[in-house]
Amino acid sequence: MAPLRSGGLPGTLRNRTYEIIFEHDTRAGKIFDVLLIGAILASVAVVMAESVAPVRSAYGPQLRILEWAFTLLFTAEYAARLWSVDRAGAYARSFLGLIDLFAVIPTYLSLIAPGGQVLVVIRVLRVVRVFRVLKLAHYVGEARILAAALRASRYKITVFLISVVSIVVVVGALMYLVEGPESGFTSIPRGMYWSIVTLTTVGYGDIAPRTPAGQILAALVMIMGYGIIAVPTGIVTVELGRHAGASSPGLRCAACGHRESDARSSYCRYCGRPLSPEAA
């Protein structure tokens, strides 16, 4: 998505609204972001408190009023964001735009689906703006390295997951055949459920093999589980090291710590401070 731009001319209310909501280098922008994060955390706390039965019975109406107040506040804020940007549709389809939208939908959803307001906890995702407020932009760069490593690992992880699913299906069918309904393995899907629980070393214990053959198979699955858990970790770790090494050359900003790989850059893309070879 292209960088957002103000939809109004300099000095207009629309432009000023854009500067306050989207810009974080100004005093007003910083204050707005801090207040927004505080409101987000408070609204999530209200929803969490309402889920506690004693608190709900004592303060239910007050909590609902607060919940609707926060929802109306965030609805107005979302509308202001759409109004102030140059391309409202592009912002609405962006990651942060979708999160902003999903943050206000659950309360309205509760009008037709009681209990839907618990999804309001999605709002906590909006605190990612804390990276801008606290000038932690260099963490965003590290997050991009992690995302790149995950993308590079997707094919290997896909093959790995297909192999795991195949093992789960085979073992589930074998346990259904060996143990049968007498031991709780009433169907192949039930056996697959047991396979997943055992292979991931969770072990709920709600169903367990009772025959010697089933116990031997279970022991093999348990041992296999320890090896399987380490596979995706190793795949991602290798790719993470590769991408981190590839991004190491370049200049480092002394102000925010961001490492710039483009040697032609003169200024930090996150905080705007000058870059110099001595900061590498």
Image: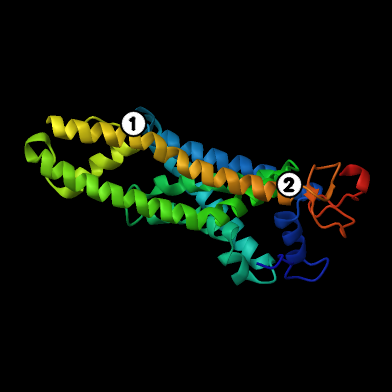
Establish if 17 lies above or below 90.
Answer: above
Q: Residue furthest top?
A: 54
Dot 2: within a 10 Å radius of its alpha carbon, few (fewer than 14), some, or many (20 or more) residues? Answer: some
- Residue name at image x 40 percent, y 33 percent: 59
Q: Is residue 279 left or right of residue 82?
A: right
Quick one: SS at disc 2?
helix
Quick one: SS at disc 1?
helix
Please tell me which residue lies in front, 247 or 53. Answer: 247
Image quarter where the N terminus lies is bottom right
**Residue 53 disc label:** 1
Q: CA distance from mark 2 to mark 1?
A: 40 Å
Dot 1: within a 10 Å radius of its alpha carbon, few (fewer than 14), some, or many (20 or more) residues? Answer: few
Image quarter where the C terminus lies is top right
Please tell me which residue lies in front, 26 or 59. Answer: 26
Q: Is residue 223 left or right of residue 105?
A: left
| Residue 31 appears anywhere in the view | no
Amino acid type, label 1 = Ala
- Residue name at image x 80 percent, y 47 percent: 27
Percent from the top left, x then y, of residue 223? 33, 32
Scheme of colours in the image: rainbow
Q: Is residue 58 left or right of residue 10?
A: left
**Upstream in sequence: badge 2 or badge 1:** 1
Residue bearing the label numbered 2? 137
Percent from the top left, x then y, of residue 261? 79, 54
- Residue name at image x 67 percent, y 50 percent: 243
Percent from the top left, x then y, of residue 104? 49, 54
| Residue 71 appears anywhere in the view | yes
- Residue name at image x 72 percent, y 65 percent: 3
